[in-house]
């Protein structure tokens, strides 16, 4: 199966083998000043002058490729947090598959690497991808506690999407909830009530809340009024290359 007329399967497989990856960043914006307080790191595959999103190449990844990709991403993020002035006071969040958080060997190696190489662990955040479901919550909790002991923050990504959201919230040592964008984009009153109750629940547990997938000013105003702490979405910026991220002049403060 060819992904598109401009990119063949062979090119994609070769690109994966050669780790022709590039990290893009989508800004996270603060509630008060609408300033960039952090970013989410997103992986891309570079084939010639084309940049492929994960939906176009993830199906080609073997288990070994997936691990190599995750290692590449974490190494790049550590390097940026240690050396790039833009991230001196900003966080970088990266997805961690739910299967990884129950892998004792992987987490042990990850903790050792981060402890030896990351200068400011409080600026790194792991976002737990809810699917597939975590089968062993006790083991996941133990492993995440090890990461938190280093100063790293833990978030639940796409909160509300899966059937285990509340169970994860109860069982895992999380610092932040990211409300699933399906609720943000819904125009139903029920969705707004769910967002409102989620924010109140999170704040009662001393957790911060990120609203992701914000595309319109109306959506921003709604979640802002409900007390959401941080915003993310195309209203502010699409995923950006490092150069675009660090040089772009934003005027988000004029949104209100």
Image (spheres, grey):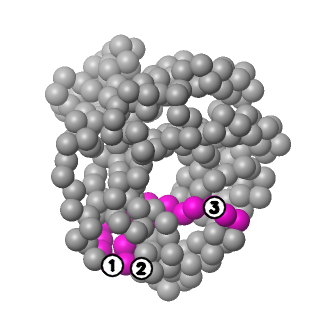
Sequence order check, earlier mark of 3 and 2: 3
Is residue 136 visible in the rendered image? The answer is no
Instruction: State the residue in front, 133 or 114.
Output: 114
**Residue 55's quadrant in the figure?**
top left
Residue 31 shown in magenta: no
Quarter containing the C terminus: bottom left
**Crowd band around label 2 with a 10 angstrom C-alpha radius: few (<14), some (14–19), many (20+):** some
Residue visible at 47% across and 23% down in the picture = 75
| Residue 128 in the image, given as x and y percentages of width and height | 60, 45
* Front in this rendered view, residue 61 or 22: 22
Q: Give the magenta-colored segment's residue range.
A: 205-221
Q: Nearer the viewer, mark 3 or mark 2?
A: 3
Note whether residue 243 is visible.
yes
Above or below: residue 53 compared with residue 106: below
Q: Quadrant of the N terminus?
A: top left
Circle 3 sits on which residue? Answer: 207
Front in this rendered view, residue 8 or 112: 112
Horizontal relation, residue 254 to residue 225: left or right: left
Q: How many marks?
A: 3
| Element type where label 2 sits in the image | helix
Residue plotted at (53% across, 34% down): 120
- Locate residue 61, reporting x and y percent: 47, 25
Q: Is 220 within the magenta?
A: yes
3D distance between C-alphas at marks 1 and 2? 6 Å
Q: Which mark is residue 218?
A: 1
Q: Which residue is mark 2?
A: 222
- Measured as percent of width and height from the top left, residue 148 is found at 68, 40
Question: Which image quadrant for residue 213?
Answer: bottom left
Between the residue at mark 3 and the residue at mark 2, the CA separation in whole angstroms equals: 20 Å
| Residue contact at pointers 1 and 2, CB within 8 angstroms | yes
């Amino acid at each position: 199966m060819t992904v598109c007329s401009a990119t063949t399967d062979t090119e994609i497989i070769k690109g994966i083998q050669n780790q022709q990856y590039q990290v893009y960043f989508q800004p996270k914006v603060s509630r008060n000043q609408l300033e960039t307080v952090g970013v989410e790191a997103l992986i891309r595959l570079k084939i010639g002058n084309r940049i492929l999103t994960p939906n176009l190449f993830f199906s080609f990844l073997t288990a070994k490729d997936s691990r190599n990709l995750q290692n590449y991403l974490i190494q790049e993020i550590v390097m940026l947090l240690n050396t790039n002035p833009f991230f001196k006071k900003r966080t970088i969040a990266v997805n961690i598959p739910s299967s990884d958080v129950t892998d004792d060997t992987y987490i042990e190696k990850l903790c050792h690497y981060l402890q030896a190489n990351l200068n400011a662990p409080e600026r790194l955040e792991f976002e737990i991808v809810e699917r597939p479901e975590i089968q062993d919550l006790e083991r996941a909790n133990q492993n995440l506690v090890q990461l938190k002991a280093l100063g790293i923050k833990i978030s639940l990504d796409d909160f509300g999407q899966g059937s285990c959201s509340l169970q994860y919230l109860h069982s895992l040592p999380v610092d932040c909830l990211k409300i699933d964008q399906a609720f943000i984009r819904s125009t139903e009153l029920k969705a707004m009530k769910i967002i409102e109750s989620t924010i109140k629940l999170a704040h009662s547990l001393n957790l911060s809340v990120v609203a992701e997938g914000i595309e319109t000013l109306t959506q921003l105003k709604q979640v802002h009024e409900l007390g959401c702490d941080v915003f993310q979405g195309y209203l502010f910026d699409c995923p950006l290359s490092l150069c675009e991220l660090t040089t772009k002049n934003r005027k988000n403060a004029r949104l209100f």
